[in-house]
Image (cartoon, rainbow, N blue to C red):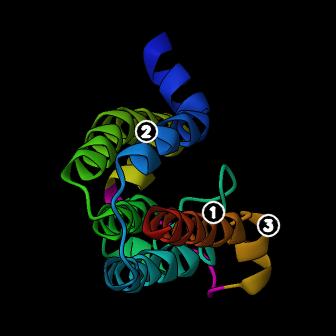
Amino acid sequence: MSNAAAVFARWRVRLGYILAVFVLWFARPTPGYVAIGAAIGLIGLWLRAYAAGYLHKQEKLTVTGPYAYTRNPLYLGSAILALGAGVATRSWISGAILLLYFAVVYSVVMRREEGELLGHHGAAFQAYATTVGQFSLAQYKKNHEYQAALGYLLLLIALLILWRLRLL
């Protein structure tokens, strides 16, 4: 895959932090919107946690759990998180930034990862023939998925702080 795809894959999280500044700048949160966004985000966090408990990065082709239904449950969870964050901001500009970021960056990253899996697993990837074990809390921790929950919590707290400061 191209150098641009490698850059997107390597820098996607850091780029997200930079964009978070703009998302927060345009945000107009209220407690009600933050609560709705939090509820939506919890679904995304649950899906990411569920998927991370099955994923064995670079070790095995993961085809069980949520991977039996979608090739990218972690990214689907991230999309739901982005939707929740967009709702929580109560800003169409912030929502558009999140949507554009996710659409551009993750479409490139998913294509790149698919190519890597195809190169590594060949026909097994195409057929999804290999299986892995059950959900594992240890695997969830190994994949550092708790960082997504912490980051989302910090975003919600920042939105509530912004809302409170604007009331003063």
Residue 165 place in picture, x, y as percent: 53, 64
Q: Amino acid at mark 3?
A: Lys
**Residue matched to label 3:** 142
Q: Look at discs 3 and 2 and give the one toward the viewer.
A: 2
Task: Considering the whole magenta stretch, tell me its main secondary structure.
Answer: loop
Residue 1 visible in the shown view: no
Q: Nearer the viewer, residue 31 or 83?
A: 31
Spatial separation of the CA atoms under disc 2 and disc 1: 16 Å
Question: Does 154 sit above or below residue 19?
Answer: below
Q: Earlier in the sequence, mark 3 or mark 1?
A: 3
Instruction: Say whether residue 57 is left or right of residue 104.
Output: right
For disc 1, the marked residue is 151
Badge 2 element:
helix
Which quadrant would the N terminus be assigned to in this image? top left
- Which comes sooner in the sequence, label 2 or label 1? 2
Taking the spot 23% from the left edge, 45% from the top edge, the residue there is 93
Spot occupied by residue 109 in the image (x, y as percentages of width and height):
42, 36
Disc 3 from disc 2: Cα separation: 31 Å
Q: Is residue 16 above or below residue 54?
A: above
The magenta segment is 127-135
Residue 51 visible in the current orientation: yes
Picture coordinates of residue 162, whole percent (x, y): 50, 62
Q: Amino acid at mark 2?
A: Phe
In three-dimensional space, the C-alpha distance between marks 3 and 1, rounded to whole angstroms, equals 17 Å
Asked if the stretch drawn in magenta spans residue 132, the answer is: yes
Task: Name the residue furthest top.
Answer: 3
Q: Earlier in the sequence, mark 3 or mark 2?
A: 2
Q: Quadrant of residue 157?
A: bottom right
Checking the image for residue 22, the label placed there is 2
- Farthest residue, direction front: 168
